[in-house]
Image (spheres, helix red, strand yellow):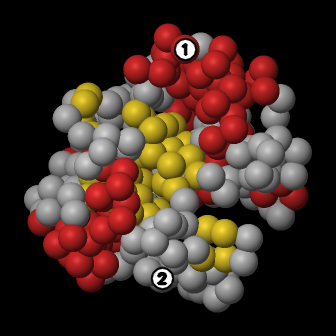
Amino acid sequence: MPQLMGKDIGPIGFGLMGLTWRANPCSEEQAFETMRTALKNGMNFWNGGEFYGTPEHNSLTLLDRYFAKYPEDAEKVILSIKGGMGPSGIDGSPEGVTFGVIDKEYVQTGKIGGISLSEVKASTVHEAAKITKIVACEVELSLFATDVLDNGVAAACKEHNIPLVAYSPIGRGMLTGQIKSLDDILRIACYATSSLAINWTRAVSKRPGMPVIVPIPGATTADRVNENAKDVELSGQDMKELDGTLSKFTPAGARYPPSIPMEG
């Protein structure tokens, strides 16, 4: 079982973004049911962001209301919350992201358990590890986006014993097996292909030179969570066939538009 900060977490985590960061978020009742279902499935590592939504409705405000209603769940969940984004974009102030300040004023005083990284290049992982203990590194990883396996990020995480948190493990819905037209992109469903995609990231973690990898698929319904939580064991032959399929494709374009800073 993977661990974060010395605590056991489930092999599959839970991404909170979709519960608040969309034009028409689901109801609070539905969100809470989804979150409780994740916890019942052992998905006790939750990942969100203070900028996932509006100031009035984002991961933190949702979590505040959730734990007010279910205080017994507070000790069961390990949270990872992204910050460093202000009204004008990236907030690089000491209060925002500077490791030395966060380590001294928050980690060492027990206000937070540790510092994680999100969407960084390998050199940043190495530099950050010199300043403070990095407890996790969140990057995009899926059959749809394998960059970090070849650009040194996964290797850097392995070197510093940093768990790699894989967001969008089903390729933002592209790997659910149901997107066949532009119209399909506007709706999200989940079939067996999503379970394969999620568990592929876990299987990659078993390869030599790879760090612990914890996928964090998101969901807005209890049914989707139950599907994402399925444990699918991929054989060596399965992985070989998937490698063969991946080798036939050449990535085109970038994962994000130029206006969004990446790999800091």
Q: Position of residue 205 (x, y in %)?
A: 24, 51
For image coordinates 30% across by 68% down, the residue present is 100
Say which element carries label 1: helix
Instruction: Label 2, secondary structure: give it.
Output: loop
Q: Which residue is mark 1?
A: 71
Residue in front for this viewpoint, 244 or 214: 214
Q: What is the three-letter code of the residue carrying label 2?
A: Thr
Q: Is residue 112 left or right of residue 240?
A: right
The residue where tag 2 is placed is: 250
Relative image position of residue 17 (x, y in whole percent): 64, 48
Mark 2 and mark 1 residues within 8 Å of each other at the beta carbon: no
Q: Is residue 1 left or right of residue 78?
A: left
Q: Give the camera-side residue of 193 and 137.
A: 137
Residue 86 position by quadrant: bottom right
Q: Residue at x 64, y 30 (%)?
A: 64
Instruction: Give the image location of residue 53, x and y in percent.
Output: 75, 52
Q: Name above or below for residue 15 compared with residue 186.
A: above
Please name the residue shown 50% across and 49% down the image.
81
For residue 168, which quarter of the picture? bottom right
| Among numbered discs 2 and 1, the one appearing first in the sequence | 1
Q: Nearer the viewer, mark 2 or mark 1?
A: 1
